[in-house]
Amino acid sequence: MILKKLIQLFEIGALLLIVCAAPSTNATAADQAAKSAQKKAAGQGLPAAGTYVIDPVHSFAYFGARHHVVGLVRGRFEKVTGTINVSQDPAACSVDVNIDVSSISTQNSKRDEDLRSPAYFDVNKFPTMTYHGRGIRRVAGSSWTMDGSLTMHGVTKVVPLTFTFNGAFPDAKPGEPVRVAFHGAAGAKRAEFGMGARDNLDELGTSTAPDVEIQIDVEADEKLPAQ
């Protein structure tokens, strides 16, 4: 009788152990599936063909500008909008980005006002910075380069942008637009855009190398057909 009860208790305990372990196993499997989907998306060269609208809440343009040759001042623009058009034909892919220059922030109000002044961006006269490009070429894997036109301070120059498709969000719900993420990088010389005249010779001399590093992180939602 005692042996029978011990066997029954052992069976009940084993059943409880299986029941308790099941949610943890399912959660682990779900996590692994999400990570696998994210990894698979990031490995693709480009997202599915379509138009993607940049989400300004989750997109930022950063920069690093040389300061007295050896220093580097970093900042960002808080307001970035635009669209990304993806095509199966790389030559037909395009990017249109608009940046509100007055949203510049270097975590120093006095410096920010100086950058907004006529000595640099002159935001009252040139409130918007734009980047327009069409056609891309693969660098390697999910990395691409576009020779787009950067318009800043009333001057337009061709500035190559190298960008990487980071993948699609794996947790989009049915009926919701696909969300994708990109990271881009470029370089420019402020003198070529008529900016920072007081710095160009005193600080940078006659160097023709880019003195501004540009980084942009973008999240964008697929534009769904009108219903």
Image: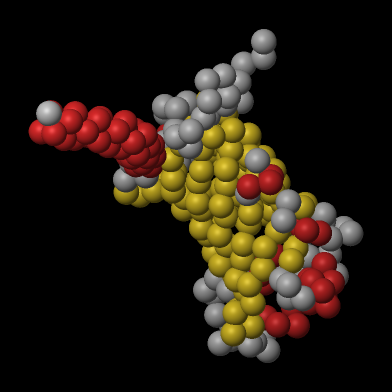
Residue 147 appears left or right of 16: right
> Residue furthest toward the top?
227
The residue lying at 29 percent from left, 33 percent from top is 16
Residue 118 appears in which quarter of the rendering? bottom right
The residue lying at 51 percent from left, 58 percent from top is 185
The residue lying at 62 percent from left, 16 percent from top is 225
Q: Position of residue 194 (x, y in %)?
A: 73, 68
Count the marks: how many? 0
Q: Is residue 136 above or below residue 101?
A: above
Residue 200 appears in which quarter of the rendering? bottom right
> Residue furthest toward the right?
124
Nearer to us in this view, 146 or 72? 72
Nearer to us in this view, 227 or 134? 227
The residue lying at 53 percent from left, 25 percent from top is 173
Please state, as top left, top right, bottom left or bottom right, where the C terminus lies in the image: top right
Residue 105 appears in the picture as rendered: yes
Q: Position of residue 12 (x, y in %)?
A: 25, 30
Q: Position of residue 169 (x, y in %)?
A: 48, 37
Residue 162 appears left or right of 130: left
